[in-house]
Image: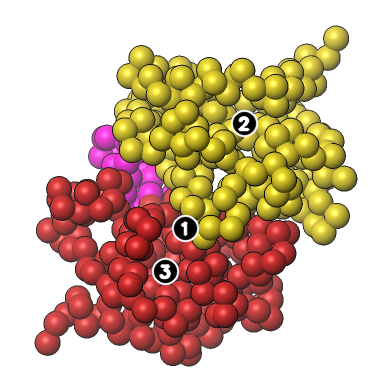
Chain colours: A red, B yellow
C-alpha cells in the first residue's frame, strides 16, 4: 500500500488529490512542521531533503511532486490522469508541472522560505516585497497561455489540475489580486466541486485539528 | 525535424546532448542573450516565458528541461535514455531531474538572476553571497544520496546524466570547491568522454565564436 507523507497547506496536497482521483489504496502520515518534524532523524531517513511530500511504495520512496504525480498517473492508467501513450501530450503535462515547481512555487517560496537563498533580514524582507509581483507574473502567463479550460489541458482532466489548484490556494496570501485571474479562480472553484478534492482537504483538516 | 532553441552556458545543453544521444534528426538555433533576443517579440512568439530551451516539434513547441528530456527519451525509445516501461524507475528519473530544476538550478540562479526575486541591490548582493552554500548543500545531497555511479541512476545512462553534467559545469563559478564532491566531478569527466557531449559542446562553441 502507498503511504503519503504530507503537511497541510503545502504542495503535498496535489499528490493527495491525485491518489484520490486514481482510486489508489493509500494511507497518509502527517509531518508536523510546527515541531520541525521534517528535520527529525526519523523523517530524514524517509526523505533526506527534509521536505514534503514523500511517497512510500513497495519499491522504495519517491519525492518531488511532478515525479510523484506522473507515477500516480502511470500506475493507475484506468484513471486517465495523463496522456500516457502520446509523448508530445505527456510532455505538455510535464512542462506545465515543471513550470509550477521551478517557477511559480519558487516565486511563492520567497515569501516564507527566503532563508534558503539569503541570510540577512533586510534581503529576506526585500524578497517578501517582490512576491506579489513575481507570483502574479506567473499567473499572468498561466491565465493567458497555459490554462486551456475547463481543465489545464483542455477537456481532459489531468495531473496538472490538482497541482495548479494546490498552489492557487495561496494566491491571496501571496498578495495577488484574484480578480486579475478569472480563469485561474474559476479553475479553483471547479476543483473544489470534485469529491476527490473535498476528501483530501477534509482528511488534512481532520488530522490538523483532531476532535 | 526537431529544432532546439538554445543559448550557450545555459541548461539547454542538457536537451542538446540528449538529442545527440537519441540520434535525433534536429537543428539548433542560437538565442543571443547578449542582445536580449530572448525577450524579442519573435522569440516570445516561440516561448512566451522568454527563456531557453524551447523545442519545436511537428506537433507544437515544448519548454522546460525535464519535460523535454522525457520527450526525447519517449520519442526515441531505442536509445534507452529512460526506463520507459517501469513507472517507479521512471519516477526516480523524473524526481532527480525535478530536483535539479526546482532546487539546484534555482540555488544557482540566485547568483546571476536575483532580480527575479528582489529589486534592491543589497538584497541581490546578499543572495549572491549565499550561492556557494546553497549550491553546495544541493551537491552534498547529490554526492551522498542521489548519484549512484557510474551514471546518476547506476549502470544505465539516462536523461539524468546530461542534465547533471550541464549544471555541474557551473560548480566553480558558483564558488563551490569541486574537491568536496569527487563523485560529481568524476561524473563530469565521464560525460566529457562521450562523443555526444563533445559534439553538443563544439556545436555551441562554433555558433558562439564563428570563424
Give how far apart the Cα atoms at labels 3 and 2 are.
31 Å
| x 46%, y 50%: residue | B92
The residue singled out by tag 2 in the image is B10
Looking at the image, residue A199 lies above or below residue A92: below
A122 within the magenta span:
yes
Give how far apart the Cα atoms at labels 1 and 3 are.
15 Å
| Secondary structure, magenta segment, majority class | helix
The residue singled out by tag 1 in the image is B88
* Neighbours of disc 3 within 10 Å: few (<14), some (14-19), many (20+): many
Give how far apart the Cα atoms at labels 2 and 1 are.
29 Å
Q: Nearer the viewer, residue B57 or B6?
A: B57
Assign the N terminus of chain B to one quadrant of the image: top right
| x 33%, y 72%: residue | A1
Q: Which residues are magenta?
A: A110-135
When asked about the image quadrant of residue B10, the answer is: top right
Q: Left or right: A119 with respect to B109?
A: left
Assign the C terminus of chain B to one quadrant of the image: top right
Q: Residue A192 appears at what percent x and percent y?
A: 45, 85
**Chain ID, mark 3:** A
Looking at the image, residue A46 lies above or below residue A16: above
When asked about the image quadrant of residue A139, the answer is: bottom right
Q: Residue A204 appears at what percent x and percent y?
A: 27, 77
Kindly state the secondary structure of the residue where label 3 is placed: helix
Kindly state the secondary structure of the residue where label 1 is placed: helix
A69 within the magenta span:
no
Is residue A53 visible from the viewing direction of this image?
no
Is residue B131 visible from the viewing direction of this image?
yes
In the picture, the disc for residue A15 is 3
Q: Nearer the viewer, residue B113 or B79?
A: B79
Q: Residue A107 appears at what percent x and percent y?
A: 46, 51
**Chain ID, mark 1:** B
Amino acid at each position: 500500500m502507498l503511504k503519503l507523507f504530507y503537511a497541510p497547506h503545502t504542495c503535498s496536497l496535489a499528490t493527495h488529490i491525485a491518489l484520490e482521483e486514481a482510486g489508489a489504496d493509500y494511507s497518509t502520515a502527517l509531518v508536523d512542521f510546527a515541531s520541525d518534524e521534517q528535520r527529525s532523524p526519523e523523517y530524514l531517513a524517509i526523505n533526506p531533503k527534509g521536505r514534503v511530500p514523500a511517497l512510500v511504495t513497495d519499491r522504495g520512496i519517491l519525492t518531488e511532486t511532478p515525479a510523484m504525480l506522473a507515477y500516480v498517473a502511470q500506475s493507475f492508467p484506468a484513471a486517465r490522469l495523463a496522456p500516457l501513450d502520446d509523448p508530445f501530450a505527456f510532455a505538455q503535462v510535464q512542462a506545465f508541472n515543471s513550470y509550477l515547481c521551478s517557477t511559480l512555487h519558487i516565486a511563492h517560496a520567497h515569501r516564507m522560505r527566503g532563508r534558503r537563498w539569503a541570510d540577512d533580514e533586510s534581503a529576506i524582507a526585500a524578497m517578501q516585497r517582490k512576491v506579489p509581483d513575481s507570483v502574479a507574473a506567473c499567473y499572468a502567463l498561466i491565465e493567458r497561455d497555459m490554462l486551456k479550460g475547463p481543465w489545464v489541458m483542455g477537456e481532459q482532466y489531468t495531473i496538472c489540475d490538482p497541482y495548479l489548484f494546490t498552489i492557487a490556494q495561496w494566491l491571496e496570501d501571496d498578495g495577488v489580486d484574484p480578480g486579475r485571474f478569472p480563469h485561474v479562480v474559476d479553475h479553483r472553484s471547479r476543483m473544489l466541486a470534485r469529491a476527490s478534492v473535498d476528501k483530501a482537504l477534509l482528511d488534512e483538516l481532520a488530522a490538523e485539528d483532531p476532535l
